[in-house]
């Protein structure tokens, strides 16, 4: 069973039809990069995957569970928020903005959710938190506050924080777009390591180098639809859809 199965996903914001029947499977251990112009629906689709946005049609299954809904008599019924939160705990998400708690140290940011949401004892959470900060190259920054960190360091703390929940799936929403160019590499390095370890990842990004080197599949979204997908070697060198050719010519 794939890690993610999205079927006919529809999303409206009032009269704006943002997602128009999106279908996407992501296998376990696969890294999928989603590309597309601003407003194409990439971020909305990512937020629908963990039910931060409620879908208006179709269905999404993550790790074998229908996301955000129960099926009764052929109809989808929205689950209670506490059950959705339990499902969401299996999905790590790293945002464009780091969203760290400014009054907490890097380590405190990492251990907050495992203690509060999963009920992990503080001692084991601290040990795991230090291990994850070391994993993203920030072992020496455990007791430092966010305002004392560079943007790239803050984003790596955000990655460690997401990993602290032991997710089955990681979602990245343009994780490097708010960073100065010289800081992008350190974040991509941490993501590359995760991919090498077999983490299932869906990444919305314009980092073509990362997509070429790390992704198993590249996807182009446009106007709320998936227009083309394929292995990066083919996607970037022999695109088939005219819109894909146009988009790639504008970013390469």
Image: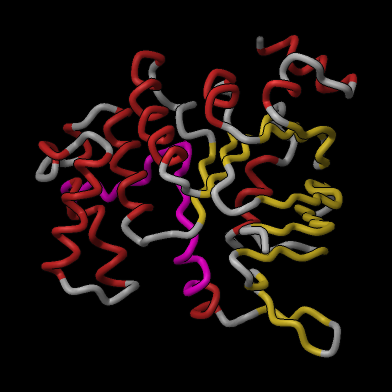
At x 71%, y 59%, the residue is 5
The magenta segment is 85-105
Locate residue 96, reporting x and y percent. 47, 37
Queried whether the magenta region covers residue 121, the answer comes back as: no
Depth check, front residue: 130 or 12: 130
Residue 192 as seen in the image, left or right of residue 115:
right
Residue 141 as seen in the image, left or right of residue 197:
left
Locate residue 194, reporting x and y percent. 41, 41
Q: Is residue 78 above or below residue 131?
A: below
Residue 248 as seen in the image, left or right of residue 57:
left
At x 18%, y 55%, the residue is 108
Residue 252 as seen in the image, left or right of residue 101:
right
Depth check, front residue: 182 or 16: 182
Depth check, front residue: 28 or 125: 28
At x 20%, y 57%, the residue is 128
Queried whether the magenta region covers residue 89, the answer comes back as: yes
Locate residue 177, reporting x and y percent. 49, 26
At x 29%, y 66%, the residue is 114
């Amino acid at each position: 069973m794939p890690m993610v199965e999205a079927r006919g996903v529809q999303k409206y914001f009032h009269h704006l039809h943002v997602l128009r029947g999106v279908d996407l499977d992501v296998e376990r251990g696969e890294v999928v990069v989603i590309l597309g112009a601003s407003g194409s629906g990439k971020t909305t689709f990512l937020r629908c995957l963990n039910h931060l946005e409620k879908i208006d049609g179709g269905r999404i299954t993550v790790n074998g569970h229908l996301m955000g809904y129960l099926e009764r008599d052929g109809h989808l019924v929205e689950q209670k928020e506490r059950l959705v939160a339990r499902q969401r705990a299996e999905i790590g998400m790293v945002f464009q903005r780091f969203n760290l708690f400014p009054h907490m140290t890097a380590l405190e940011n990492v251990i907050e959710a495992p203690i509060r949401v999963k009920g992990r004892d503080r001692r084991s959470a601290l040990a795991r938190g230090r291990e994850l900060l070391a994993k993203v190259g920030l072992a020496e920054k455990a007791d430092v506050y966010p305002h004392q960190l560079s943007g790239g360091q803050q984003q790596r703390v955000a990655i460690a924080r997401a990993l602290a929940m032991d997710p089955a799936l990681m979602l990245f929403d343009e994780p490097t777009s708010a960073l100065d160019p010289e800081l992008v590499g350190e974040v991509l390095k941490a993501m590359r390591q995760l991919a090498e370890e077999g983490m299932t990842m869906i990444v919305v990004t314009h980092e073509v180098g990362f997509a070429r080197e790390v992704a198993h599949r590249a996807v182009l979204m446009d106007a709320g639809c998936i227009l083309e997908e394929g292995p990066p070697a083919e996607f970037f060198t022999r695109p088939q859809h005219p819109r894909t050719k146009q988009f790639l010519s504008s970013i390469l």
